[in-house]
Amino acid sequence: MNKFNLLVLILLSIGFGACDEDDTSTDYQAPTIYNFENVSYSGQTQRLAMLKEMKDYMKTGVATDVTLDADRLAAMFSNAGEAAGWTGTFEDSKQLRSKTFEAFQNEFDQLLENLAVHSQESEAVSDFGAVGIATNASGNQYLLNEKGVELV
């Protein structure tokens, strides 16, 4: 028996030996009635509406004659009052940034900045390695970064 087979046999013995049939517990009883009286979905609903409005604004940057405002995108992400230019009404305390994993917030800031920069391209391009808008045979347009990654 080679060393690999012996190692596999040892690991399987440990794994199966660790299982104990007596570990299953049926003491927990699921409640038959749940009380949702104290649940509020207004924050989640507002953030979803904010995200939709932000997405709709970002999609306008695909047109060759529209340049996205980086400050407005940042304001929308942070719900920074009038600078966000919301058409809807949202509570000041509700924002997308605070619900984004903290380690990735700066990456989102950079992505939004890049989106605004690339929306400034005024001509359509055909190769996916170029910056700006690529138009395929069906007439669809895409806002791409310098690596050909679709931004919206």
Image (cartoon, rainbow, N blue to C red):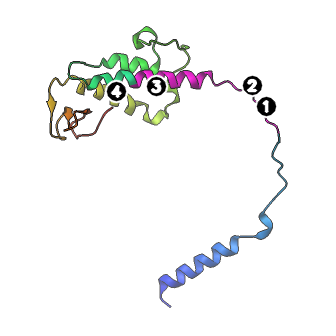
Residue 69, x across and y down, in percent: 30, 17
Residue at 64% across / 72% down in the picture?
15
Give yes or no for contact between labels 3 and 2 (Cβ–Cβ under 8 Å): no
Q: Residue tagged by mark 1? A: 35
Would you say the residues marked 2 and 4 are in contact, meaning their CB atoms lie under 8 Å apart? no
Residue at 48% across, 85% down: 3
Question: Three-letter amino acid code at disc 3?
Answer: Leu
Picture layout, residue 8 above or below residue 132 = below
> Mark 1 and mark 3: span between their CA atoms?
29 Å
Query: Callout 4, which amino acid?
Result: Leu
Q: Residues within 10 Å of mark 3 (few under 14, many from 20)?
A: some
Which residue carries the number 2 mark? Answer: 38
- Position of 134 with respect to 90 (left or right) is left
- In this view, 60 is above or below 34: above
Amino acid type at image mark 1: Asn
Quadrant (top left, top right, bottom left, bottom right) of the C terminus: top left
For disc 4, the marked residue is: 112
The x, y position of residue 32, in whole percent, is 83, 41
